[in-house]
Image (cartoon, helix red, strand yellow):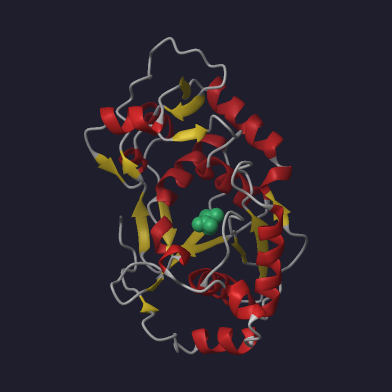
Amino acid sequence: MIRTRFAPSPNGSLHLGHAWAAIVAHDLARARGGEFLLRIEDIDGARSRTELAEEHLADLSWLGLSWDGPVVRQSARLESYALAAERLKALGLLYPCRCTRADVLAASRADGPDGPLYPGTCRGQDVDPEGAAWRIDMARAVRMAGPLEWTDELAGPQQAAPERFGDVVLVRKDAPASYHLAATLDDAADGVTLVTRGLDLFAASHVHRLLQALLGLPVPVWHHHALLVEADGRKLAKRRGSPSLADLRRAGEDGRALADSLRAGNFPAGISLGTGVGCAA
Ligand code: GLU
């Protein structure tokens, strides 16, 4: 049986782009007789807000989407992230790093999929681990895991290339996991078989495939869907004026009708479905 999920972060209101992502994940599960899970990615204690998580649930119900089982909250799973990080440390694959964002920016000589590539400043150094972030020694991890493949059901088979991310942070200074570690562990813990999310996260799946190999986790199939974009081709963002679903809901709009028109490809003026199936960026 297939199981998909929608995994919003409650640090801002949902907009039409999120509605589209949720509908894709929900409808794929329903069309194939599977299950659709909802996961609140509230690992970021400083930016996550309980009332926004509640707002997200209300938005999804308003769109006519139903989910199976209890809502999963990452904040309830911090211990499992810490345990996985300990396993990676025991394999000698993580090292502490105290660099700030500004340090990385100043030292970086190339861009990776997530911005300035970390040049490995703290690797092999005697860094005080107290309150530090922990990065993966990517070259070593890739050697340990060997060649890996993964499949996106739209883009086809992929050779995993996590080294393009360099030594990414897996344990944050302020949280027991980064997005990469938490999302990978959760998808495995929840038995997600089809990881459905936007193409903007395509490249992240290379890292997630590596973590699955290192931690002995099951390997799902991925479905990276096209994003809703504005007339200039940029993805929707609330800060550029895309209305929030909560605003539309409170203004009395019909959420189910909105969801149906998105399904039919009738997007509001100035919004369209971007292209780029399987873009490697
Ligand atoms: N929480 C992520 C976001 O809101 C989604 C991550 C995922 O689907 O893997 O962009």
Image quadrant assignment for residue 57: bottom right
Most distant residue in the left direction: 109
Residue at the image point whose x is 40% and y is 25% from the top = 99
Q: Along the line of sight, which residue is nearer the eye, 264 or 218? A: 264
Residue at the image point whose x is 57% and y is 75% from the top = 23
Q: Position of residue 209 (x, y in %)?
A: 46, 46
- Please determine whether, in this image, residue 14 is positioned above or below residue 89: below
Left or right, 189 with reference to 106: right
Q: Position of residue 189 (x, y in %)?
A: 67, 48
Q: Along the line of sight, which residue is nearer the eye, 112 or 214? A: 112
Query: Is the C terminus in the top left, top right, bottom left or bottom right quadrant?
Result: bottom left
- Looking at the rendered structure, the number of numbered marks drawn on it comes to 0
- Please determine whether, in this image, residue 14 is positioned above or below residue 249: above
Q: Position of residue 72 (x, y in %)?
A: 71, 54
Image quadrant assignment for residue 22: bottom right
Most distant residue in the top direction: 126
Query: Is the N terminus in the top left, top right, bottom left or bottom right quadrant?
Result: bottom right
Left or right, 74 with reference to 178: right
